[in-house]
Image (cartoon, rainbow, N blue to C red):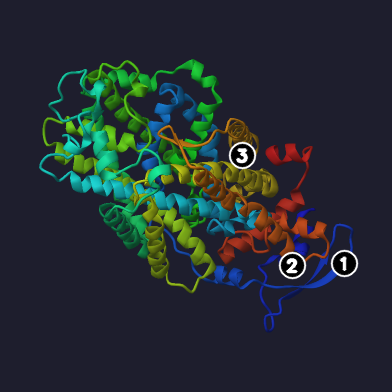
Amino acid sequence: MDDAEYQKLRCNVQGSRPEQSGSGSGTRAVIYTSAGEELTMTCDIVQEMESQSSIQRDKWSKGVEFLFSCIALSVGLGNVWRFPFIALENGGGAFVIPYVIVLLLIGRPVYYLEVIIGQFSSRGCIRAFDMAPIMKGIAYGQVYSTALATTYYACIMALTIRYLVASFSEILPWTYCLAEWGSSCVATGSSLGSNSSLSQGVSSAELFFTQTVLREPETLEESGLGTPSWDLVLCLMATWLIIGTILCRGIRSSGKASYFLALFPYVIMIILLIRAVTLPGAWRGIVYFLEPQWSQLLSPHVWYAAITQMFFSLAICFGTLVMYASFNDFHKNVHKDVIIITSIDSMTSILAGCIIFGILGNLAYETNTTDISQVVKGGAGLAFISYPEAIAKFKYLPQLFSVLFFFMLLVLGIGSNIGMASCVINVVKDRFTHLPHWLLAVGASLIGFVCGLVYMTPGGQFVLNLVDFYGCTFIALVLAIAELLAAGWIYGVKRICSDIEFMLNIKTSFYWRICWAIIAPGLMFLVLVYMLFSYEPLTYRGVQYPPAYYMAGWGIWALGVLQLPFWAVYTIYQQPGKTFASKLRMSLQPTADWGPLQSQEYEAYILHRKRESELKTSRGSYIFDNIFG
């Protein structure tokens, strides 16, 4: 179907946005089927479409606010908390090489693609899929996954506030043993005894985290989740008060906050890096982190870990980047921004890795351990056990450095959570434009707080691990593949490149084209196949979950992934054609008003598409033409 046929089919008469006539009965138009049959019908103009085009969308106060907001979104707990323990579980240096390769072949291309789609359409992540309506379920699934991630990121922030408050104690509470911890406890303060003492017991930092802060059970089968800890509930409340306050002011307020949210963490990380490299044995840990273990590069699990970490590190395929980019000026050259953001994000992950592995090298030195990967447990333990242990060894003002470190974690968490919560809020705001922004922000904060209470129970970390895997990692991988297929093959790489040329007046290189069309979706599909074939029941600290929890996990996953077929069927059903074939064709084409949101830009875009259609020449098969055309 060529562009002219499509314009007839979508009731886009005269090459302008459809306008409602009369009393709202719709625009009368003539539609031609692929067989040439003429159909006369009435097209209903959706009120949602009218309100979207008539209301002036918010914009960043300055172009640089987009850059800093994206840095604050991407550079977060995924870099400082998640990246080091993922690297630890996958061979240290063996993980860094796949991570960099995945950045170049998947992370950066997908990041650029989502930013382009958001800026071009000036729509939130749901309406951005007007470019391929049949795939709109991708956006709903991503928003669902983002909402889940928002709740457990707030949990990590609550733990951070708990440690931040404890850091003001005269003596850091994780540096000494309590009687109830038993005789196996070994104090990890600056006056640590012999090198072999810790290897025969459990550090006080670990016991403080598991026994005092979390009150964590060995398994869920005996005690269940338990009741929320009142101190953690207060910390969670404080977390959502901070997030809600920033969200209430809208995108302009979060843009101003991004300067601090993006820059301050680097000051603390540089201080910690200097301290880490001066610890005895630190360089052995850093070498373990950076030295490639070539045999591990053939392990599919390492590549799977690199790709899934890329989702969290860059915050791609969660809808947040599309939302942020939708507030850009239409002609903003985001190509440079994307290169800067993705480079800074990856360098931050490497920096955080050097800090944590320097600390782990020191712990291995003190415990006479040769295997650095066995020094400490993974997961949240790296942020709330290893870092505090290192801070406890500061000779001067350990309380000050502890406050700075946990304040840095809090800032990182806020930056990421603001972006994710804004994505969810703007989806609702785009649908219910009459609702005030502050009401949506308050409502989202209250719901996030209530949902987060489950993480504040003794078994909360079990739930966090479950939601992280089934609700975020697993869903993100499936929907990311579908997103690339929708953008690269249903909407088309060729048309994306044409839109970029119209918007930015630049040609798109072969690198971006081949990554969007083949490499990125191909690699992710292979990882998904490996993941399904090698699937084993999820564990937390080596402990399996009760059967009911696995059922809940698969239910969480299904609720996100099944958005795709549900909305596809619904979209096909609501098309105005008489036959299934005509309905299907229409659902595969962009909606009538797809294009720039601004009227002048939209009119220029229609002329641009008309010229493209007149000059269109096929260079071979559809596959070849889509990539190279």
Q: Which amino acid does label 1 sit on?
A: Glu
Coordinates of residue 92 in the picture (x, y in percent): 40, 24
Q: In which quarter of the image is the C terminus?
A: top right
* Label 1, label 2: how far apart the Cα atoms are: 13 Å
Binning the other alpha carbons within 10 Å of mark 3 as few (below 14), some (14 to 19) or many (20 upward) gives many
> What residue is shown with label 2?
11
**Mark 3 vs 1, N-terminal side:** 1
Q: Which amino acid does label 3 sit on?
A: Trp
Residue at (39, 32) in percent of width and height: 85
Binning the other alpha carbons within 10 Å of mark 2 as few (below 14), some (14 to 19) or many (20 upward) gives many
The relative height of residue 181 versus residue 250 in the rendered view (above or below) is: above
Residue at (44, 61) in percent of width and height: 59
Asked whether residue 125 appears in the rendered view, the answer is yes
The relative height of residue 105 versus residue 213 in the rendered view (above or below) is: above
Residue at (40, 47) in percent of width and height: 224
Residue at (27, 55) in percent of width and height: 230
Coordinates of residue 290 in the picture (x, y in percent): 38, 21
* Label 2, label 3: how far apart the Cα atoms are: 31 Å
SS under mark 1: strand
Q: What residue type is labelled 2?
A: Cys
Query: Residue 52 versus residue 460: which sits nearer the camera?
Result: 460
Query: Residue 619 versus residue 158: which sits nearer the camera?
Result: 158
Say whether residue 302 is left or right of residue 171. Answer: right
Asked whether residue 388 appears in the rendered view, the answer is no
The relative height of residue 449 versus residue 225 in the rendered view (above or below) is: below
The relative height of residue 191 versus residue 557 in the rendered view (above or below) is: above
Say whether residue 356 is left or right of residue 14. Answer: left
Query: Residue 215 versus residue 176: which sits nearer the camera?
Result: 215
Q: Residue 516 carries which label?
A: 3
> What residue is shown with label 1?
38
